[in-house]
Image (spheres, grey):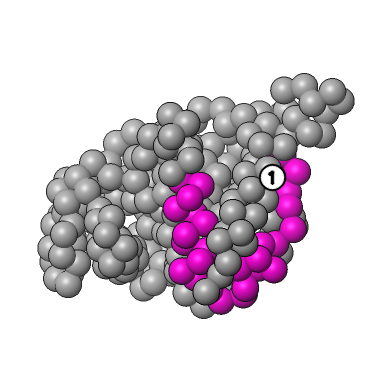
Amino acid sequence: MIALENLSAAVERLERASASGVPCEPIADLLGASDIDAAYEVQKRITERRIAGGARLVGRKIGLTSRAVQAQIGVNRPDFGVLFDDMQFADGAEVPFSRLLQPKAEAEVAFLLARDIPDASDPVAVRDAVALAFPALEIVDSRIADWRIGITDTVADNASSGVFVIGAKGVALDAVQPADVVMTMLRNGEVVSHGTGRDCLDDPLNALAWLARTAIEIGLPLRAGDIVLSGALGPMVPVRPGDVFEAKIEPLGTITARFSEKARFSEKEGGEQ
């Protein structure tokens, strides 16, 4: 059992890094390298504090679904985090770089749920719960310095969440097989990542089913109206101030994320934003 003071210390360390813009040391020293339950408890506490402060949940995100990304991080299992309303940006909108610490972009399929998923044992029922699929760019971020993360670090840190962009128009699943989508991601016009739906647990719907089962197990099942980011289709790529990322996910469409030139406020004199 992880001591309560260690859980509280992990929460405080991550929240301090987020507020200050200064990445912190890994929290595995507080939680251990493999106690995933403790890591999710830290994530839960931070989530509850954000909600108490006025943030609104809009869905969930699945992380570490791509073998390429797992290799980059050095883990071998998915994880999940929550999506808040202030994390979402419109297609083509400028994302303020000042709210990010160490951002990296990854392209993926997003799902909008039409109904609750109280039972994830039937793959057909999971698929039928999806209203629409969208092209998406997730900008992952880490409060942990230099991305020196293990599984407990990233889970506690809301699955290394940052912000996300999803397309304005979705596609019904009778018109697309998520496993067959083809992704090309460009940074400032140069191809930097590519993959297919099969790079996400062999099918983004498999990732959704994994999340649905896990959400039921923890007593927080997926609900109608939830947005679900299903996981990366290829390697994540560092984001720099002023970058423009474009993800082409055929046949879902193309999506763009633009980043401001402004650096993190902690890098400016006087803490000015």
What is the secondary structure assignment of the residue under circle 1?
helix
Residue drawn at x 41%, y 67% is 200
Q: Position of residue 206 (x, y in %)?
A: 30, 69
The amino acid pointed to by label 1 is Ala
Quarter of the image where one finds residue 241: top right
Residue drawn at x 51%, y 66% is 38
Q: Position of residue 20 (x, y in %)?
A: 72, 37
Residue 249 in the magenta stretch? The answer is: no
Residue 175 in sight from this viewpoint: no
Classify the position of the C terminus by image quarter: top right
**Span of residues in magenta:** 21-47
Q: Who is closer to the viewer here, 82 or 3?
A: 3
Q: Position of residue 221 (x, y in %)?
A: 24, 56
Q: Who is closer to the viewer here, 110 or 196?
A: 110
Residue drawn at x 49%, y 70% is 36
Quarter of the image where one finds residue 214: bottom left
- Residue annotated with mark 1: 17
Q: Residue furthest front?
A: 4
Q: Position of residue 13 (x, y in %)?
A: 67, 50
